[in-house]
Image: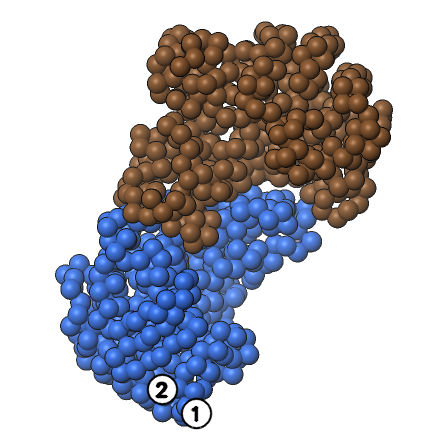
Chain colours: A brown, B blue
Amino acid sequence: MPVGTRGTVKGLLPDLVAQTGSQVVLNNTYHLLLRPGPDTVQKLGGVHRFMGWPGPILTDSGGYQAFSMADINAVDDDGVTFRSIIDGREVRLTPESATRVQNQLGADIIMAFDDCPPSQTVQAEEADPRLARALKRDAIGRRGMDHAERLRIANERTVRWLERCKAAHGRADEQALFGIVQGGTDLDQRSWSAERITNIELPGYAIGGVAVGEPAEEIARIVSHTAPLLPEHKPRYLMGVGYERDLVAAVLAGVDMFDCVLPTRNGRNANAFTAGGPIRLRNAAYTEDPSPIEPGCDCPACDPARHGWQAPGPFSRAYIRHLFMSGEMLGPILLSLHNVRLFQRLMTDIRRTIQEDDWEGFAARWPQARPGLGQVLPAV
Amino acid sequence: MPVGTRGTVKGLLPDLVAQTGSQVVLNNTYHLLLRPGPDTVQKLGGVHRFMGWPGPILTDSGGYQAFSMADINAVDDDGVTFRSIIDGREVRLTPESATRVQNQLGADIIMAFDDCPPSQTVQAEEADPRLARALKRDAIGRRGMDHAERLRIANERTVRWLERCKAAHGRADEQALFGIVQGGTDLDQRSWSAERITNIELPGYAIGGVAVGEPAEEIARIVSHTAPLLPEHKPRYLMGVGYERDLVAAVLAGVDMFDCVLPTRNGRNANAFTAGGPIRLRNAAYTEDPSPIEPGCDCPACDPARHGWQAPGPFSRAYIRHLFMSGEMLGPILLSLHNVRLFQRLMTDIRRTIQEDDWEGFAARWPQARPGLGQVLPAV
């Protein structure tokens, strides 16, 4: 699922998103709650009409952002209070209000409101000052609470909050509420959470609190432990993941759905994903390179004619580099388009490979995904 | 003609530009000369392949920008020397080199290199600090040269330079070279320039040095004087104009072609053109406005279904306002798309109105253009 944080997949007209083969688009409740607000979106007919996306939409609950982005937050057994990043006003989210907001936004899939304590992963703190600040603000940082204890409290709270979300859900016939399994990097906590969360009857379940700074092996370890604990015949959704190797490892563990900002965020920064590995289009090596971003790709940037566009040829790496060097919007647009399509191609190929059971062939086509194939291929 | 300064109509994929009904796109030689450079564009197959635009392209000569944008410039009888706004290196443009650069870029219509002394119009100096600086740098400012004398020198120089452009034009069979009539706001100078410029046999002629700060009446006065002096059966191109009233007044004077940055520049700043007048979409009045930018408009933003887009409805003013308030690229994209289409609708309607000779009907449909109809309708 491409991420449309504020009701738009950055830079891409909905018709272009559709041309990437994307089916479901994700919107962030936290952002739409603060601006333009759920009343406005509801008056305008809900998120589908609002953003002009005819396909399914999923909204997260706002929990993760409330915990990680707010300048000041306080979590208690009832909910979380934080300051709006837009105007500083105090905002309160509870399981009930987060669910009501998502009822108003009107997405097809809505997510439970969970307690997301900051990851203690060292990499996260070093790599992401925002996460480090979140850790400092949390009970772990403020009261010196033991991280395992904080995780246990969050885990129990998340179960109680899910019950409250389900009870508050006013549109269960129209919107599928998914529960979220937490538990950090502690597999026992993951098992406990999975059991309690899946005891609450819902149309789908997600794995949260993953890919917040851990190395790929750690992500795979958590996911391959947790995914099989979720009902097999309901959608399993891994939130916020990831790179090619992470996706294929998770699919092999039984995950069905993913969202990630990488394709669009990296695209905006001139970084293209290709099956052969990432390329950085600001690199001077591409100054006169007439080839498309990824030869053979069927995206509108690499193969406009296939999409019925009148064009004298593919958009060249040289042209896209020029656009980025000149600060032109079309650079981010073309690379976002390519990157989103690349991940849809990857997922299509994974589906085909599951049917044909030819993982060697898959690994040859997607060398970047190779490290995630440990379950089916020997390490090289 | 929408303006694609650096080889892209800002924010719009070429296929979207085509969906606005645009035929010719303009590129700026000055910008492409400095980056990525004419050698690179030529190696990549010329501007059409470079930017992915299958239709005709027009390049200006770089003269206007060299005079108005460079931090340091010096003009002599042979050409102009200026510093690159990108890396500060000294660049020299002469009639020969400007023509050669345009031969390399490979547009269908190329423009003569002319001497463009800064306008003395008071409004320009007050409104545009860049033009005021240009005036100070010019001989007018540096040596206290009389403005009329400077204009006369520029006018004579422009004729000699046009002869040199024509002689240097190496691809006359493939690229149509247009001459440019100068003369500022002095109608005698305009007459002199038109006579001398049109004495040089070329496939088309332009009116330059207009809309550099003058009021609408002044633009109409210059254009209605100058346009009839150009050959009737060759294209007459008014450079860098303008608003609805300016366009219709110029058409009535006999002008055939226009380029202007207004549709895209205003679009990027949340200003939409509509037949009923401009609207500013950041205005809080549109916070919950479900209507399209301009009801009845056939552009992809106002009527996506007409363009074969799967969409639950038009993009609302409320949504576009939200995009601008959130700094999302899709706001500028949607408004640029609408604005470019609006001006194509205007021009289509002007063509129809010429055939049907119903200017009252036209004025009722385009009230913004009403002040430009002085030649055919009594003032109201």
Answer with the quarter of the image where residue A119 lies. top right
Circle 2 — which element? helix
Q: Pointer 1: what residue? A: B144
Mark toward the start of the polypeptide (1 vs 2): 1
Q: Pointer 2: what residue? A: B151
Q: Is residue A332 left or right of residue A215?
A: left
Quadrant location, the C terminus of chain B: bottom right
Tell me which amino acid carries mark 2. Answer: Leu
Q: Is residue B212 left or right of residue B313?
A: left
Chain under disc 1: B
Label 1 and label 2: CA atoms lie apart by 13 Å
- Residue shown at 53%/26% (left/top)? A242
Q: Are marks 1 and 2 on the same chain?
A: yes
| Image location of residue B241, percent across then percent down | 42, 69
Q: Residues within 10 Å of mark 1 (few under 14, many from 20)?
A: few
| Image location of residue B74, percent across then percent down | 35, 79
Q: Is residue B304 above or below residue A61?
A: below
Circle 1 — which element? loop
| Image location of residue A13, percent across then percent down | 49, 40
Total label count? 2
Q: Is residue B343 above or below residue A300?
A: below
- Residue shown at 47%/39% (left/top)? A267
Q: Given this view, does label 1 or label 2 mark the residue nearer the observer?
A: 1
Viewer can see residue A275: yes
Viewer can see residue A49: no
Tell me which amino acid carries mark 1. Answer: Gly
Chain under disc 2: B
Q: Residues within 10 Å of mark 2 (few under 14, many from 20)?
A: many
